[in-house]
Image (tube, rainbow, N blue to C red):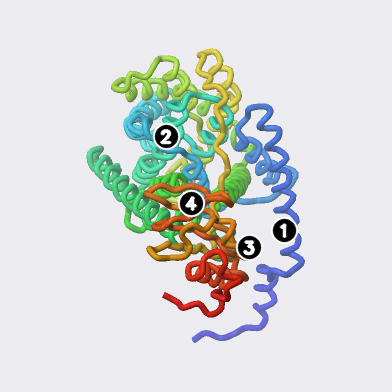
Amino acid sequence: MCSYDPRNAPLRQKRNPPLTVHHLNQLLLVCSLVLLVAVAAVRISSRSGLPSLLVYLGIGVLMGQDGIGDIHFSNAEMTQVIGYAALVVILAEGGLGTKWKEIGPALPSASALALGGVAVSVGVTATAAHYLVGLEWRQALIIGAVVSSTDAAAVFSVLRRIPLPARVTGTLEAESGFNDAPVVILVVAFSTAGPVEHWYVLLGEIALELAIGAAIGLAVGFAGAWGLRHVALPASGLYPIAVMAIATAAYAGGALAHGSGFLGVYLASMVLGNAKLPHWPATRGFAEGLGWIAQIGMFVLLGLLVTPHELGDDVMPALIIGLVLTMVARPLSVLLCLIPFRVPWQEQTLMSWAGLRGAVPIILATIPMVNGVDGNQRIFNIVFVLVVVYTLVQGPTLPWLARTLRLGGGNEATDLGIESAPLERLRGHLLSVAIPEGSRMHGVEVGELRLPAGAAVTLVVRDDASFVPSPTTVLRYGDELLVVATDPVRDAAEKRLRAVGHGGKLAGWLGTDKNPKRR
């Protein structure tokens, strides 16, 4: 039997004080200041060539327990969940900005790198971690799998500022979007208690999850694009929300179906991004803003999770593993996977150096922490140091290497931000008017229709051809007119058109525009 002791109530209240409006105001102030500092830091990173993730990680470290903020945070499970959510947004934003014409020819090579390249990288890196650093095989395999994934956020933020050939950019962007799925499966398998499953079982699971994720992602993307093109929403601001909701649904559907949700959201976003949706500039800007927020929040949280004074003993192992990964594993995987595609050595060299790591490996390093793998803190520290050091080395040197290899793609014309708006948003109507045999509208000039202000003939379809009419264009039998009329004059415009159809251009003076007979 349970009894209530009032003496314990004050103690419970003291340990867990309620969240007040004052606390909320403080939290909002801190978050807004972090966002402002992060936004200002983008300017620094863009000028220096550093990926912005390093700046955001630095902000998190400064706010942590060894920094000026003295915030103690060690919840790896929360970091993993928030990191997954942020990665979904980042992949969605990257997919929306990917063009079919660039990524289409690169899909075979990107798929080879995302699958075969990961296998080669895991094998070489794990072997080095075991024999050169002295890690146990399970720890070595986890590190090898974690750092084998190139980071979508880092790749998108760096490559899109460098004028590279479309094949190089398309291959690297697609690889970073595709290789998260097999790497997540490998890290989870290696972090599970008990013996590691046979390699052919892991290959079967990877293939099945990729197939399920791809099918769901494409299905959701095409269905969502069709719906957004055929369902007019009452406000332009709803379209960006709908697009991001569809992309998120692709991830959730793929994950719930035991497939790759990351592949699903990337493919669905690519379909949506190439579907010529209404209000596309607003949608693209909204997704880009969400992507920045996701990056800032994720990297700051990862910076809070790390404890800098504990990194000392793991710096040298991280440098050794990173050196093998950068100079041996990555170039070897690029060389072996791109042999069938006859990629020039200059492009292979750049792709080898452009295998950027970022937040994804650090997020994946929280999986062994959540699962309680022996030495999980050391795994996290090694991955953190490796990512920071080699991103600091690779990111700023990419433009120099591209120029040295003469791979500059030149300045290409930017697509125009042309926006299509449903008529419901403009409070207007599109009227289709067919001129039948016997109509008095035959022989009338467009200007003689004398439509009310707010209505206009925008297009004439004649003999299976269409053209924009001038005021002196003479209408004929069989013509079909497209008339745009605002909501206040819609009825008046229709009434005037019917009157001219009955009484010709003099309908206003002959009285035939009053209560015309409807056909």
- Circles 4 and 3 in contact, beta carbons < 8 Å: no
Q: Is residue 167 visible?
A: yes
Q: Quadrant of the C terminus?
A: bottom left
- Circles 3 and 1 in contact, beta carbons < 8 Å: no
Q: Residue at the spot x=57%, y=25% of the render?
A: 411
Relative placement, left or right, of 401 versus 351 is right
| Residue at image mark 4 | 277
- Nearer the observer: mark 3 or 2; the answer is 3
| Residue at image mark 2 | 101
| Residue at image mark 1 | 28
Q: Earlier in the sequence, mark 3 or mark 2?
A: 2
| Real-space Cα separation, disc 3 to disc 2, in angstroms | 40 Å
Q: Amino acid at mark 2?
A: Lys
Q: Percent from the top left, x then y, of residue 309? A: 64, 37
Quick one: label 2, few (<14), some, or many (20+) residues within 10 Å?
Answer: few
| Real-space Cα separation, disc 2 to disc 4, in angstroms | 17 Å
Q: Earlier in the sequence, mark 2 or mark 4?
A: 2
- Nearer the observer: mark 4 or 3; the answer is 3
Q: Which mark is residue 163?
A: none
Q: Is residue 452 above or below residue 385?
A: below
Q: Is 485 or 192 nearer to us in this picture?
A: 485
| Real-space Cα separation, disc 1 to disc 2, in angstroms | 43 Å
| Residue at image mark 3 | 454
Q: Earlier in the sequence, mark 1 or mark 4?
A: 1
Q: Residue at the spot x=41%, y=33% of the render?
A: 144
Q: Amino acid at mark 1?
A: Leu
